[in-house]
Structures are given as C-alpha cells and as structure tokens.
Image: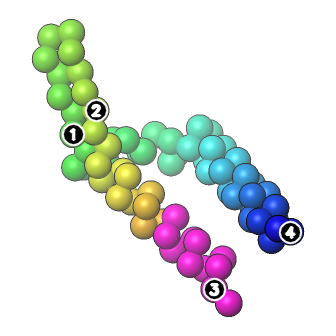
Amino acid sequence: MIHFGKLLIIIGIILIVIGFLVSNTFIGKFLGKLPGDINIKKGNFSIHFPIVTCLVLSIILTILIRIFTKK
C-alpha cells in the first residue's frame, strides 16, 4: 500500500507540472490547434475534436510511464 501512495504523489506532481506547462508556456498555444484536429463551425454551432492532440499526448505519456516504471 505504501507504493500506491507514492505513485499517487508522483502522478499528482506530474499533473501539476503538465498543468503549468499547458497554461503558462508556448505549449498551451499549440495544444488543440495541431494539424489534424477537427473544427466544425456552422452558424451558432461549433464542435472541436482534438484528435491529433490526444494522440500526441498519449504517446508522450506512454513514453514517460514506461521510463518511470521500468524495473
């Protein structure tokens, strides 16, 4: 159970760092606006599907998790 607590603390710290990067740096300007993200606007109706952004974030998080959990 001690390992689970440490894991939660590490995940929390990582989320805080990611939140800071997204909100305060150039990364926040590009997320959601990558080529391949779908924007549909018709009159008063708009939909945004950040497909490529989700893929990029998934790849980055997968790499980070594999680095930190390697035994």
Can residue 17 be seen by looking at this rendering?
Answer: no
Depth check: give the residue in front, 43 or 66. Answer: 66
* Residue tagged 3: 70
Residue placed at 36% from the left, 51% from the top?
A: 53
Find the magenta span and give its range: 61-71
Left or right: 33 as drawn, with respect to 28: left
Can residue 33 be seen by looking at this rendering?
Answer: yes
The first of marks 2 and 3 along the sequence is 2
Q: Amino acid at mark 4?
A: Ile
Can residue 69 be found in the magenta stretch?
Answer: yes
Residue 3: % across, % down: 80, 71
The first of marks 4 and 1 along the sequence is 4
Q: Amino acid at mark 3?
A: Lys
* Residue tagged 1: 38
CA gap between label 4 and label 3 equals 18 Å
Measured along the vertical axis of the image, is residue 67 above or below residue 46? below
Quarter of the figure with the C terminus: bottom right
